[in-house]
């Protein structure tokens, strides 16, 4: 039994069962269901993102896209299908993805003697096409054509797209055969510029994680064994979930000249000499929504950071008498419009559901603020609102004027509080140790979180390899704060 499981309270009433302490993996799946975020698709290993969940992704896209463009990056779009020969140009790269690639071999179907649709053997492709597992090689071909001179550099590109990696053990948002992401690909004239860019984009991600997702981020470099295939350095953001497991939030890769060589990306420099370019790539995917859930959700469902919530205020009309319906709904519509003028997104639940059901829907979806409006509230000029992150302690009764004048501050305060609460939860998740015996004892005791140890102690260590295998742990990163001298080891998603 884990330390978390020992703290289970029996007979507790929660909207989501089992609770986090009772069964974290099942709780995670049930939060997704309760909040209407996503569901398993008919295609093995894939997910259908429901409108409420996709609205979260749209907000992630909107904010992050603005931050990316502030770095003078341009959006583009590249083909979904990549010729096998392109990927095969970089041996280490294809070796890293070979077991995850989906392959297109035919371009036509026909009905056989049994009336079944099957690939037409006469339509076999001259060269198989790979459904993109990542786009370094296909984008490299364009970079080869677009970069001729130092005047064309730096070239900074980004695309928002889908990715296919044949996942054997799928889990909604965290690992699916198809997922959504953005992938940036930049080209530079020097090694220094490339490394600075890889580090800079990690800073952009860190800003986004902390100020939008409200998730504390540990910046660091991956160990050589954990690097992106073909990269000379992989920088990462690692975050700890409430159950103590780590989640790789995103990565930024210094690709050196690996892909420049395979794609022949060269430029004529100021000195008149043709030189090989240096490239980087960096990406963030829908798995961040999984992190959002596992950091912020509670046993009643999702808790949305206001900056990413599909709507920030849920307006609940309380109708006890049909004679009051039109008056109440008109009042709710006016409040919603007035909030929109202030830049606050709101949605009025006009369904025929019971008031209690409307409230629980808001709670499970994690709507930051729910606002109750009935005939009495209108008559008294008083509104009742509740902040999701505070529960019953966050319930207040104020005048309409006060609500409208303070709501922006309420949401801003909630955003900051959620980051602080996440910091508090993350405290103590990483335990400093000095020996591999301490590491073994830590994981054998099923303690929450991971460990930090001198990096030299795990390098080439058979004992560490045995610990990795026995407890399913991995080196997460070499934190920048330790100047690469220590490594964090933990179980991870």
Image (cartoon, grey):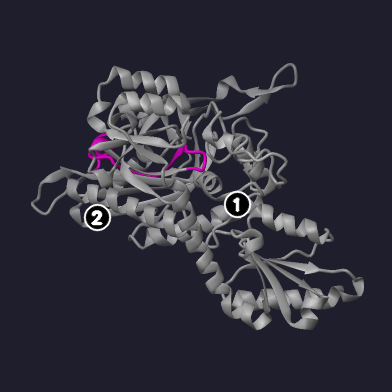
Which residue does the image show at 87% across and 75% down from the upper left?
A: 324
Q: Which residue is mark 1?
A: 54
As drawn, 190 above or below 312: above
Label 1 sits on a secondary structure element that is: helix
Q: Nearer the viewer, residue 196 or 367?
A: 367
Question: For residue 399, what is the image quadrant?
Answer: bottom right
Q: Which residue is mark 2?
A: 152
Q: Position of residue 23 (x, y in %)?
A: 62, 34
Q: Position of residue 187 (x, y in %)?
A: 27, 48
As drawn, 368 above or below 148: below
**Left or right of residue 190: residue 6:** right
Residue 258 included in the magenta stretch of the image? yes
**Left or right of residue 54: residue 376:** right
**Left or right of residue 277: residue 369:** right
Q: Quadrant of the N terminus?
A: top right
Q: Which mark is residue 292?
A: none
Label 2 sits on a secondary structure element that is: helix
Which residue does the image show at 36% across and 35% down from the upper left?
A: 451
As drawn, 491 above or below 188: above
Which residue does the image show at 43% across and 50% down from the upper left?
A: 159
Marks 1, 2: nearer the viewer: 1
Residue range (magenta): 241-265
Question: For residue 88, what is the image quadrant?
Answer: top left
For label 1, count other residues whose C-alpha is less than 10 Å away and answer few (under 14), some (14-19) or many (20+).
some
Residue 330 shows in this picture: yes
């Amino acid at each position: 039994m884990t330390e978390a499981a020992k703290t289970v309270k029996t007979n507790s009433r929660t909207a989501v069962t089992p609770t986090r302490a009772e069964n974290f993996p099942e709780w995670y799946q049930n939060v997704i269901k309760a909040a209407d975020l996503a569901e398993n698709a008919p295609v093995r290993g894939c997910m259908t993102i429901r409108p409420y969940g996709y609205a979260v992704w749209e907000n992630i896209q909107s904010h992050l896209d603005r931050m990316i463009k502030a770095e003078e990056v341009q959006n583009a779009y590249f083909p979904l299908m990549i010729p096998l020969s392109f990927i095969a140009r970089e041996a280490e790269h294809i070796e890293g993805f070979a077991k995850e690639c989906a392959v297109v071999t035919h371009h036509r179907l026909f009905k056989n003697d049994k009336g079944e649709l099957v690939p037409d053997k006469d339509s076999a492709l001259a060269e198989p096409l790979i459904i993109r597992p990542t786009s370094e090689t296909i984008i490299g071909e364009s970079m080869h054509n677009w970069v001729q001179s130092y005047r064309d550099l730096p070239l900074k590109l980004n695309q928002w797209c889908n990715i296919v990696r044949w996942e054997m053990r799928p889990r909604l948002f965290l690992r699916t055969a198809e997922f959504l992401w953005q992938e940036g690909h930049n080209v530079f004239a020097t090694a220094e510029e490339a490394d600075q860019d890889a580090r800079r984009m990690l800073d952009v991600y860190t800003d986004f994680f902390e100020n939008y997702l409200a998730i504390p981020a540990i910046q660091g470099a991956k160990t050589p064994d954990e690097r992106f295939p073909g990269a000379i350095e992989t920088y990462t953001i690692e975050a700890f979930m409430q159950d103590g497991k780590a989640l790789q939030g995103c990565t930024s890769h210094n690709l050196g000249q690996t892909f420049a060589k395979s794609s022949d990306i060269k430029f004529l420099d100021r000195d008149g000499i043709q030189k090989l370019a240096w490239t980087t790539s960096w990406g963030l995917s829908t798995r961040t929504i999984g992190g959002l859930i596992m950091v912020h959700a509670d046993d009643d469902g999702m808790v949305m950071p206001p900056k990413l919530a599909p709507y920030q205020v849920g307006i609940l009309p309380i109708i006890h008498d049909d004679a009051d319906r039109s008056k109440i709904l008109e009042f709710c519509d006016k409040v919603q419009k007035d909030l929109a003028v202030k830049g606050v997104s709101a949605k009025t639940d006009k369904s025929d559901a019971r008031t209690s059901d409307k409230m629980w829907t808001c709670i499970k979806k994690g709507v930051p603020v729910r606002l109750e409006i009935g005939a009495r509230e209108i008559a008294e000029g008083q509104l009742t609102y509740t902040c999701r992150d505070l529960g019953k302690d966050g319930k207040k009764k104020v005048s309409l004027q006060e609500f409208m004048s303070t709501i922006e501050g309420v949401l801003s305060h909630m955003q900051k509080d959620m980051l602080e609460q996440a910091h508090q939860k993350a405290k103590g998740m990483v335990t400093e140790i000095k020996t591999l015996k301490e590491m073994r004892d830590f994981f054998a005791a099923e303690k929450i979180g991971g460990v930090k140890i001198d990096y030299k102690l795990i390098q080439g260590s058979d004992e560490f390899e045995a610990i990795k295998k026995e407890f399913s742990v991995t080196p997460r990163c070499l934190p920048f704060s330790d100047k690469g001298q220590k490594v964090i080891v933990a179980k991870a998603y």
